[in-house]
């Protein structure tokens, strides 16, 4: 409840959401599920009379994830894959497309499916959006579109193209996100679609799926289970981390106050830290140990080559957004 109060008091133009139908895809995921829950709480507080449509692939998982909201008249579950033809006819004021497998396990076992969700899913939703005149489409892209940072860029601004080796299967994720961004801009050009894109940094929070195999998610699982964290690399990669509640607020600023056709980074330049130091901070606060055991690295593990990825959030801050959680505050809130 405290998190929703921070959101409701952050100065967003909430009137734009009155009586709005909002579609959130990938709603079981960390970012999308947090956004759905926060909007439901703000809806009650501000009496916006909005409707949240949470699109998920698996009914059982969705009902478990949103069990506390199934009786809320403002909440509606839609069960289907975004890659399939959309089986509903609802006029949405906002479509927030966050359906994507953004973890190494999916990249290793089903890279084709990763690409389908990012491209075909985006295509289906954009085609749906342009049937209506007043739909704003927000694509949740990724900081991975900036690639390997071969030029040693200190801060990635939205106009930097980056470098991705598109011949590697690991590039299924950043390359399909890039293609999805191009698709958004193509729909704007050809059909006049109202599109906005956000590129989140490394987002952390507790609403994680069991299938997620990201390193920081593994760290969190270990801490929540009171087990030590074992790292297989020295974790020298430098990232800008951002707590999920700051990320969802940034998404809403982009959706409600952003310019059509613009791209906005979401991150926190004050939360720049190596992967190792992030794990150490999590271990310290969670009361477990951090160990380095490279000899135990699971077979098939693929490490992302990018050594430094820090996002410049000047554009998003220009809309009025600012992060409200330090790294320590975010981790403590996550572990509550």
Image: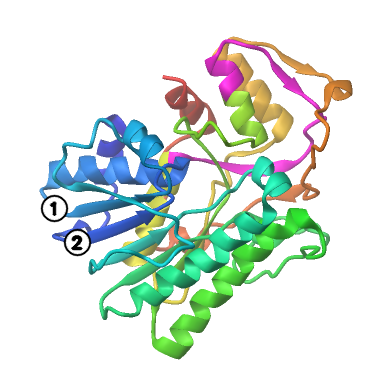
Q: Earlier in the sequence, mark 2 or mark 1?
A: 2
- Return the residue at label 1: 48
The extreme right residue here reads 295
Name the residue beneath numbered marker 2.
20
- Please state the extent of the stretch shown in magenta in the rendering: 221-244
Query: How far is mark 2 from mark 1, CA to CA?
Result: 8 Å
Quadrant location, the N terminus: top left
Examine the structure image and report whether residue 20 is included in the region drawn in magenta.
Answer: no
Q: Quadrant of residue 324?
A: top left
Q: How many marks?
A: 2
Q: Secondary structure at mark 2?
A: loop
Within-10-Å neighbours for mark 2: few <14, some 14–19, many 20+: some
Left or right placement of residue 281 versus residue 198 in this view: right
Q: Are discs 2 and 1 less than 8 Å apart at CB?
A: yes
Q: Secondary structure at mark 1?
A: loop
Give above or below for 240 relative to 299: below
For the point 38% across and 41% down, which residue is it?
34
Quadrant in which the C terminus is drawn = top left
Q: Residue at x 31, y 80 (%)?
A: 131
Position of residue 278 measured from the top left corner of the image (x, y, whole percent): 65, 29
Q: Residues within 10 Å of mark 1 (few under 14, many from 20)?
A: some
Return the residue nearer the eye: 133 or 120: 120
**Residue 121 seen in render:** yes
> Relative to the observer, which residue lies in front, 21 or 11?
21
Magenta span contains residue 235: yes
Out of 199 and 274, give the one closest to the viewer.
Answer: 199
Q: Quick check: can you spot residue 323?
A: no
Q: Position of residue 7 (x, y in %)?
A: 30, 43
């Amino acid at each position: 409840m405290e998190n929703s109060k921070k959101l409701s008091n952050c100065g967003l133009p909430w009137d734009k959401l009155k009586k709005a139908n909002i579609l959130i895809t990938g709603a079981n995921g960390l970012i999308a599920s947090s956004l759905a829950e926060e909007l439901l709480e703000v809806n009650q507080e501000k009496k916006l009379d909005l409707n949240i449509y949470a699109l998920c692939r698996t009914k059982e998982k969705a009902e478990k994830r949103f069990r506390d909201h199934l009786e809320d008249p403002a909440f509606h579950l839609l069960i289907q894959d975004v890659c399939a033809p959309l089986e509903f006819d609802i006029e949405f004021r906002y479509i927030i497309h966050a359906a994507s497998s953004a973890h190494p396990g999916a990249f290793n076992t089903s890279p084709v499916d990763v690409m389908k969700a990012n491209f075909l899913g985006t295509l289906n939703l954009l085609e749906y959006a342009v049937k209506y005149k007043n739909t704003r489409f927000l694509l949740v892209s990724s900081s991975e579109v900036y690639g390997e940072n071969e030029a040693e860029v200190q801060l990635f601004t939205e106009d930097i193209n980056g470098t991705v080796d598109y011949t590697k299967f690991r590039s299924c994720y950043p390359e399909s996100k890039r293609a999805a961004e191009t698709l958004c801009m193509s729909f704007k050009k050809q059909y006049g679609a109202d599109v906005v894109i956000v590129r989140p940094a490394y987002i952390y929070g507790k609403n994680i799926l069991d299938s997620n195999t990201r390193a920081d998610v593994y760290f969190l699982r270990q801490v929540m289970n009171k087990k030590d964290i074992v790292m297989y690399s020295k974790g020298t990669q430098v990232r800008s981390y951002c707590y999920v509640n700051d990320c969802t607020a940034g998404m809403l600023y982009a959706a409600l106050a952003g310019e059509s056709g613009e791209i906005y980074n979401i991150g926190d330049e004050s939360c720049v830290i190596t992967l190792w130091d992030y794990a150490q901070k999590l271990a310290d606060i969670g009361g477990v140990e951090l160990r380095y055991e490279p000899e135990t690295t699971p077979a098939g593990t693929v490490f992302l080559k990018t050594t430094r990825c820090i996002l410049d959030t000047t554009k998003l801050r220009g809309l009025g957004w600012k992060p409200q959680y330090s790294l320590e505050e975010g981790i403590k809130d996550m572990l509550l």
